[in-house]
Amino acid sequence: MLTFRDVMGCMDGTGPIDCSGRGLTSLEGCPEIVEGAFDCSGNLLTTLEGAPAVTGSFDCSRNMITSLDGAPKTVGGDFNCARNLLTSLSGAPSKARGSFDCSENLLKSLKGAPKKIKGRFDCSHNLLASLDGAPIQTGAFDCSGNRLTSLLGAPDEVLHDFDCSANRITTLAGCPDVVAGRFSCAGNRLENLRHGPLKVNGSYDCSHNLLTTLNYAPGRIGGRFIFAGNQVLAGHASIGKGYRSGASILPGRLQCAG
């Protein structure tokens, strides 16, 4: 057993603490409060028991943590618990003023996640079959690389990018109406774009699906419209910036209305 006290000694927590990559197996001996950021990433931790309250960011990524019990209740910056062995977000901070990264775990549920995230919420590369419990408002939202079949439970409001690529999605039901950044539903099992966002300010990527039509595409896309890798749309790849109104494929040619 190698504790925080063994490696870092007695610290008063009046400034940021970085105990990353030290081989720690326990946070025993941490100060109760850290005025600033706390980084215990890249250790051998299996629990957050003994973790401090923080006024800045909290990073416990790249450990072997199986539960967020003991995590700070609120985080003044980013919260990063990526690349652990978490199966749920029970015990997660109820508030994080920055981004929230729980990617590359074993999550089957997002219950316990904060309701609002100002920055990026990243739950990519887990075992999620549902977005139940996801925040209702985020900056960017990334749920790529899971086992999702729909987007029910997705945030109502996404202020930047939305990425649901590399899942098993057959319907865009549950998708927010407006995506302020880029939207990607690439690498799924979609046959149409019904129920997708009505407006996308950035690029829209629906490549490598099973699309037979581009009907129900957004009325306006601010960036490129990318639809390569759909068998029935073979021979076409994308439309440039400023795409407006509905687009559909007829044999041998691309039609862009508006």
Image (cartoon, rainbow, N blue to C red):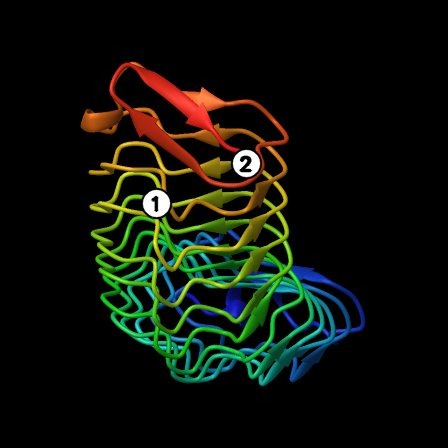
Classify 255 as above or below 121: above
In what element is the residue under mark 1?
loop
Residue at 42% x, 72% y is 26
What element does badge 2 sit on?
Answer: loop
Residue 170 visible in image: yes
Location of residue 163 in the rendering, given as x and y in whole percent from the top left corner:
44, 49
Which of 204 and 99 lies nearest the eye of the viewer? 204
Q: Residue furthest right?
A: 14
Q: Residue at the spot x=63%, y=44% of the render?
A: 201
Where residue 244 sits, quadrant-wise, is top right
Residue tagged 2? 203
Tell me: 76 left or right of 42: right
Disc number for residue 240: none
Q: Quadrant of residue 179?
A: bottom right
Task: Give how far across and how far down residue 153 sits, in percent.
Answer: 38, 74
Residue 236 seen: no
Toward the viewer: 158 or 235?
Answer: 235
Q: Residues within 10 Å of mark 2 (few under 14, many from 20)?
A: many
Q: CA distance from mark 1 to mark 2?
A: 14 Å
Residue at the (48%, 55%) spot, across then down: 197
Residue at position x 42%, y 25% in the image: 255
**Which of pointers 1 and 2 lies earlier in the amino acid sequence?**
1
Find residue 134 and report its horizontal and vertical position in percent: 43, 73
Q: Residues within 10 Å of mark 1 (few under 14, many from 20)?
A: many
Residue type highlighted by circle 1: Ser
Q: Quadrant of the C terminus?
A: top right
Is 139 in front, or is 192? 192
Q: Against 23, is 155 above or below?
A: below
Q: Which residue is mark 1?
A: 165
Compared with 32, 9 (above or below) is: above
- The kind of residue tagged 2 is Ser
Q: Nearer the viewer, residue 36 or 138?
A: 138
